[in-house]
Image: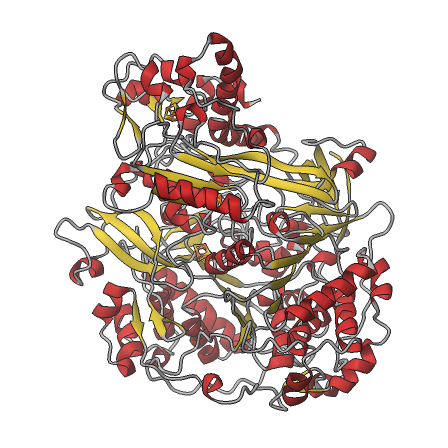
């Protein structure tokens, strides 16, 4: 027990990370010159600078407390709709992301073999020249399409897209197919928008969460909204094979069998349609295809779904009735997934349709807040060159309904390995870690092996940088400007709180420098970051100084079309499409339909993953503060099941899938179904440049087999089955 | 009992999601070393048998007692109770005798030998963030809580709010505001859906421990020791982790091929 630890042991801890242990011990960084000049700080360089979190993609507004030129604390910005004064544990630990002792602060050029982690420091001149030269060589020898570009959801993405489209490559990898393609494509097919916004008003009385673990996968304001709704007495029904922290707070937890969410939702629709519980005027006015849906739903009775899902027929019927009775103050949350299977698209369609049938539009769901604002300006730029090469990721030739901007990343990786339909030779990776994120890590490393040249941009030596030829050190989110973000009728800013440490530079700077070296300077017509933001603000008549001081600019009241007129949807029919002709035309079922997912054989388990509140994907395990307050990553197994296999809590076990094997300690718990195991994701790093994270936990991507939902292109993450034995 | 007009915390275990934002916030605000903490989430974890399960967590730090045992026990007067609530500690006066650690029924003050040698500050504990409350801010832990599980305010107001909740939602809570009278009354109130002992809170009477017999001390000291262990558990956790990394380095390997160099 911990009680036996002596003072000596703690001394060792003290020595282990000397100098980096206490935030108070850091070398004082320089306060951002820009903040000083714009008068946000007082004469002693103290005060609060408004900016924006980047520890996940929710982007909470923050206030960085600066004392005598040093940033000492981050607070949630009460004026920001995503934080409302709060930050989650990751947001609170953001300082440690900037002050990570493992930060890469100079451009690096590889000197050893790939994967050896031997680099030398280089100047920006040399590194950028080398990158540009390699990109141009590849373009000349094999065509622009031989350069692959990939980047994960971030604010400088418009400039990243400028780089790739201006360069002329169609090959764009985003992380979305690894996460929520099914949700986005289903909403596009149903509502003509990626993700309707959810409204948690005081009347919201019924919330159906299909694996949306909002109390561990935190989005600060929405997490608060859910907590407040529960506090008011709203009913929350939560589906998840695990008893998560959200399950613990839900009114009703349904430990559904993985892959069977579709059966559950089809049965809900069956009850609502057959008992005529739907909102008849809303459906007849605003939707098309009800008849076809009704016919398809007939076999999907609660009695049919019960043995599949493990949820009693009466329970399904009751929930359907309760949900319809609570409507329109009822919300079925799309979530990202409870589990991802090749049938996930239909699951998501069924959820989208459930909301439509009960007519909660305009009450608990509404038009999504787009991140693209027509009101913001942008530097002038020429049109992109015409790109005629096929995409390597099968969009649209294999995945006809997946949007180009979203893509199918795992397919891109597979086709790099196959060299089909052509061979890619170079990979530009910005703030992304495909070595950890795509299923089947060995195969991703194989794809790296096919490359003549790999360049990665990040703030630390992530696992992909570890295998790169050049690493470009980006300034952290507390050290740089990014393009502005519109939310509703406000535009928010991310601005430097301290000057970049070392030689780190903003993405805006890096892309412009590269663009110029590639002869694409016309696509980057701004002098520096501030100039870019001024050009964005120009049409608003708001000064950059004002935005910097307040943290946001108020847009003039321009009533949204949806608020003033009848609701309309940007689907081909202009209505909510219960039946989608778009889907039918390309050979997919036009209404959601049952597809039986594969199930584990005797002795195998479903391998589940899912977020913990203290970490974001694969990017934060090296943050010392989060490391300090995180639980050790383990493999959860039902305690009864473990006992029957002769396994005890804390045992080292070997987990084996069709493609890989990892060792990890067991957590024997009642909080999971007997047919599942759960692995804390994001651990098992390959980069020894991550001195805190390296050697901890095991990688789920080393186990995950690549299966793809044929409609949405989403990775069927939970379709991997494993065996577990004592290590 | 005399009327008390000062600040207090309210913690609602039914709302806490064990996210630990409060802990990170405290560590940053108060520049706590990476192997220490002044605040920790404790609790029963998951209880019950699948699928009839329950889970609770409890955010624990100094209770800021009205009649602090730490203060009474300290031979050199290093502790004081500010009129507005916080029980604070003056490191310059501390001689490192650890009487406060033994006296506190909640096991809050913890000992830091390294710091003692270097800075003369042997003891550390939650301070209620005077640097923040003096300028009208909430303590760091409270300010960031995304679910309002932690609240801060005037003691009287919070107490009334807590009792109102018990009256309004009797099925939701155990009918008791822990900390209202325990140990002579504290400035940290706790509402819970599971028995308070399960949250790791000692059953205490309204008499401060210092006034009761040795017999009761025997009951409470194990609690103190238990909490001391949890308190240092974070440090121990970090340590075990690092040790484990070395010991099991050979076990933590995957069966992956190395990437091939392209010729
Ligand atoms: S949810 Fe947390 S990590 Fe994400 S932006 Fe908000 S504070 Fe940052
Ligand atoms: S909880 Fe312990 S340390 Fe805090 S005031 Fe009470 S006796 Fe003192
Ligand atoms: S921040 Fe709030 S919800 Fe999170 S652990 Fe602390 S008290 Fe609980």
Give the left or right position of residue B122, taking residue A429 as reference: left
Q: Residue at x 54, y 52 (%)?
A: A618
Q: Residue furthest left?
A: A43
Q: Residue at x 73, y 41 (%)?
A: A637
Considering depth in this image, is B130 or B27 the residue closer to the camera? B130
Quadrant placement of the C terminus of chain B:
bottom right
Q: Is residue A643 above or below residue A409?
A: above
Considering depth in this image, is A431 or B51 the residue closer to the camera? B51
Question: Could you say where residue A617 lies in the image, as x and y percent from the top left?
Answer: 55, 54
Quadrant placement of the N terminus of chain B:
top left
Q: Is residue B184 above or below residue B14?
A: above
Q: Residue at x 79, y 33 (%)?
A: A643
Question: Could you say where residue A607 lies in the image, as x and y percent from the top left?
Answer: 72, 50
Q: Residue at x 41, y 67 (%)?
A: A155
Considering depth in this image, is B65 or A702 the residue closer to the camera? B65
Question: Could you say where residue A327 lies in the image, as x and y percent from the top left?
Answer: 63, 72
**Which quadrant of the frame does ligand 2 lie within?**
top left
Whether residue A14 is visible here, answered yes or no, is yes
Question: Could you say where residue A389 lies in the image, as x and y percent from the top left?
Answer: 59, 82
Q: Is residue A377 above or below residue A706?
A: below
Considering depth in this image, is A249 or A37 the residue closer to the camera? A249
- The coloring applied to the image is secondary structure
Whether residue A669 is visible here, answered yes or no, is no
Q: How many marks?
A: 0
Q: Residue furthest bottom?
A: A573
């Amino acid at each position: 027990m911990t009680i036996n630890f002596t003072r000596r042991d703690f001394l060792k801890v003290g020595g282990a990370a000397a100098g980096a242990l206490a935030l108070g011990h850091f070398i004082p960084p320089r306060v951002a010159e820009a903040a000083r000049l714009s008068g946000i700080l007082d004469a002693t360089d103290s005060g609060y600078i408004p900016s924006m979190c980047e520890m996940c993609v929710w982007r909470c507004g923050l206030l960085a407390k600066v004392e005598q030129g040093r940033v000492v604390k981050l607070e949630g910005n009460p004026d920001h709709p995503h934080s409302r004064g709060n930050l989650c544990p990751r947001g609170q630990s953001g300082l440690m992301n900037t002050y990570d002792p493992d930060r890469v602060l100079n451009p690096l050029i590889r000197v050893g073999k790939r994967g050896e982690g031997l680099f030398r420091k280089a100047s920006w001149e040399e590194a950028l020249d080398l990158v540009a030269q390699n990109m141009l060589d590849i373009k000349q020898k094999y065509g622009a399409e031989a350069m692959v570009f990939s980047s994960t959801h971030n604010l400088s993405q418009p400039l990243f897209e400028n780089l790739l489209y201006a360069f002329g490559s169609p090959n764009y990898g985003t992380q979305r197919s690894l996460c929520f393609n099914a949700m986005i494509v289903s909403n596009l097919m149903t509502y003509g928008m990626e993700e309707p916004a959810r409204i948690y008003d005081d009347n919201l009385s019924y919330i159906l969460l299909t694996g949306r673990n909002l109390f561990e996968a935190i989005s600060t304001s929405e997490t608060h909204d859910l907590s407040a709704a529960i506090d008011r007495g709203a009913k929350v029904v939560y589906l998840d094979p695990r008893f998560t922290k959200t399950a613990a707070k839900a009114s009703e937890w349904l430990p559904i069998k993985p892959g069977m969410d579709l059966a559950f939702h089809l049965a809900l629709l069956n009850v609502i349609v057959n008992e005529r519980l739907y909102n008849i005027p809303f459906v007849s006015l605003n939707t098309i295809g009800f008849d076809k849906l009704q016919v398809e739903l007939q076999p999907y009775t609660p009695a049919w779904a019960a043995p599949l899902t493990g949820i009693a027929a009466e329970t399904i019927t009751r929930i359907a009735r309760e949900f319809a009775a609570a409507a329109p103050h009822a919300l079925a949350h799309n979530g990202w997934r409870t589990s991802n299977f090749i049938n996930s698209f239909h699951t998501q369609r069924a959820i989208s349709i459930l909301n439509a049938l009960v007519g909660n539009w305009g009450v608990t769901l509404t038009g999504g807040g787009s991140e693209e604002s027509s009101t913001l300006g942008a530097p002038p730029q020429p049109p992109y060159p015409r790109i005629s090469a096929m995409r390597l990721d099968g969009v649209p030739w294999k995945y006809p309904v997946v949007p180009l901007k979203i893509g199918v990343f795992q397919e891109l990786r597979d086709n790099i390995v196959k060299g089909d339909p052509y061979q890619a030779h170079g990979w530009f990776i910005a703030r992304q870690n495909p070595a950890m994120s795509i299923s089947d890590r060995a195969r991703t490393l194989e794809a790296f092996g096919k490359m003549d040249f790999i360049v990665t941009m990040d703030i630390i030596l992530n696992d992909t940088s570890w295998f790169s030829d050049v690493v470009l050190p980006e300034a952290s989110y507390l050290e740089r400007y990014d393009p502005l973000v519109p939310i509703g009728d406000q535009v928010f800013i991310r601005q430097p709180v301290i000057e970049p440490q070392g030689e780190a530079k903003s993405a805006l700077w890096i892309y412009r420098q590269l663009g110029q070296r590639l002869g694409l300077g016309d696509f980057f017509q701004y002098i520096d970051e501030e100039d870019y933001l001024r050009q964005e603000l120009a049409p608003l008549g708001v000064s950059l100084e004002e935005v910097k001081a307040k943290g946001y600019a108020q847009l003039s009241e321009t009533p949204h079309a949806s608020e003033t007129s009848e609701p309309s949807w940007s689907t081909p029919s202009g209505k909510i499409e219960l039946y989608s002709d778009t889907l039918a035309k390309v050979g997919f079922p036009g209404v959601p339909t049952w597809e039986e997912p594969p199930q584990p054989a005797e002795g195998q388990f479903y391998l589940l993953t899912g977020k913990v509140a203290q970490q974001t994907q694969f990017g934060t395990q090296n943050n010392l503060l989060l490391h300090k307050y995180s639980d050790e990553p383990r493999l959860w197994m039902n305690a009864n099941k473990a006992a029957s296999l002769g396994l005890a809590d804390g045992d080292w076990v070997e987990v084996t899938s069709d493609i890989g094997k990892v060792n990890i300690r067991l957590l024997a718990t009642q909080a999971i179904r007997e047919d599942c195991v759960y692995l804390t994701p994001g651990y098992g790093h390959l980069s020894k440049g991550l001195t805190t994270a390296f050697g901890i936990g095991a990688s789920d991507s080393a186990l995950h087999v690549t299966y793809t939902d044929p409609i949405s292109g989403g990775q069927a993450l939970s379709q991997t089955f494993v065996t577990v034995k004592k290590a | 009992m005399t009327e008390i007009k000062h600040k207090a915390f309210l913690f609602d275990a039914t709302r806490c999601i064990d996210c630990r934002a409060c802990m990170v916030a405290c560590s940053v605000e108060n520049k706590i070393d990476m192997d220490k903490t002044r605040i920790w989430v404790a609790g029963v974890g998951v209880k019950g048998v699948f699928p009839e399960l329950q889970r609770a967590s409890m955010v624990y730090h100094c209770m800021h007692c009205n009649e602090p045992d730490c203060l009474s026990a300290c031979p050199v007067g290093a502790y004081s109770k500010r009129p507005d609530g916080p029980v604070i500690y003056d490191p310059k006066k501390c001689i490192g005798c650890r009487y406060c650690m033994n006296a506190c029924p909640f096991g809050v003050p913890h000992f830091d030998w390294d710091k003692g040698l270097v800075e003369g500050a042997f003891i550390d504990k939650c301070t209620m963030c005077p640097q923040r409350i003096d300028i009208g801010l909430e303590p760091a832990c409270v300010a960031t809580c995304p679910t309002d599980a932690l609240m801060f305010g005037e003691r009287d107001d919070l107490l009334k709010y807590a009792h109102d909740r018990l009256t309004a939602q009797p099925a939701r809570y155990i009918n008791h505001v822990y900390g209202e009278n325990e140990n002579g009354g504290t400035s940290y109130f706790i509402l819970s859906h599971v028995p308070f002992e399960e949250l790791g809170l000692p059953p205490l009477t309204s008499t401060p421990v210092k006034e009761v017999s040795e017999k009761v001390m025997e009951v409470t000291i194990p609690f103190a020791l238990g909490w001391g262990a949890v308190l240092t558990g974070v440090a121990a956790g970090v340590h075990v982790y690092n040790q484990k990394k070395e010991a099991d380095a050979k076990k933590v390997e995957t069966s992956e091929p190395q990437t091939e160099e392209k010729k």
